[in-house]
Image (cartoon, rainbow, N blue to C red):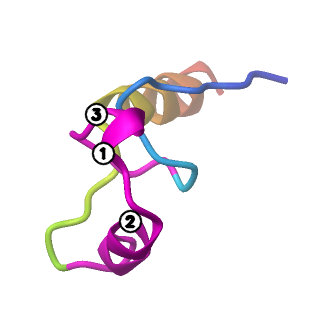
Amino acid sequence: MTFLFPDDANHVLKHEPRPRSELVQAQVMVGYNADDARLDPEVVAAIVAWLQAR
C-alpha cells in the first residue's frame, strides 16, 4: 500500500496553489468541483506510474 500526500494538493488530490495557512474553508469547498479544478500533477504521475507497474 502506498500513501501520497503532495504538498500542493488538497485532500481530494486536486491541485491547490495556495499555502495551507492561507486557505479559507468556504473558498476551498467551492473549488472542489470548479471548472478549472484538476488533479495535482504529482498525483497524476503517481497514478500513471502505479498503472504502468501493473
Q: Observer-nearest residue: 27 or 46?
A: 27
Percent coordinates x, y for residue 32 in the rendering: 39, 72
* Residue found at the very far right of the displayed protein: 1
Ranked by sequence position, the earlier of labels 3 and 2 is: 2
Q: Nearer the viewer, mark 2 or mark 1?
A: 2
Name the secondary structure under disc 1.
loop
Residue at x 37% of width, y 50% of height:
23
The answer to whether marks 3 and 2 mark residues whose Cβ atoms lie closer than 8 Å is: no
For label 1, the residue is 16
For label 2, the residue is 28
Q: Give the range drawn in magenta.
A: 13-34
* C-alpha gap between disc 3 and disc 1: 11 Å
What amino acid type is highlighted by mark number 1? Glu
Residue at x 47% of width, y 25% of height:
6
For label 3, the residue is 41
Q: Observer-nearest residue: 16 or 38?
A: 16
* C-alpha gap between disc 3 and disc 2: 18 Å
Within the magenta stretch, is there residue 11? no
> What count of labels does the image hold?
3
Name the secondary structure under disc 2.
helix
Residue 28, located in which quarter of the rendered image? Answer: bottom left
Disc 3 residue crowd, few under 14, some 14–19, many 20+, Cα 10 Å: some
Within the magenta stretch, is there residue 15? yes
Percent coordinates x, y for residue 5 in the rendering: 58, 27
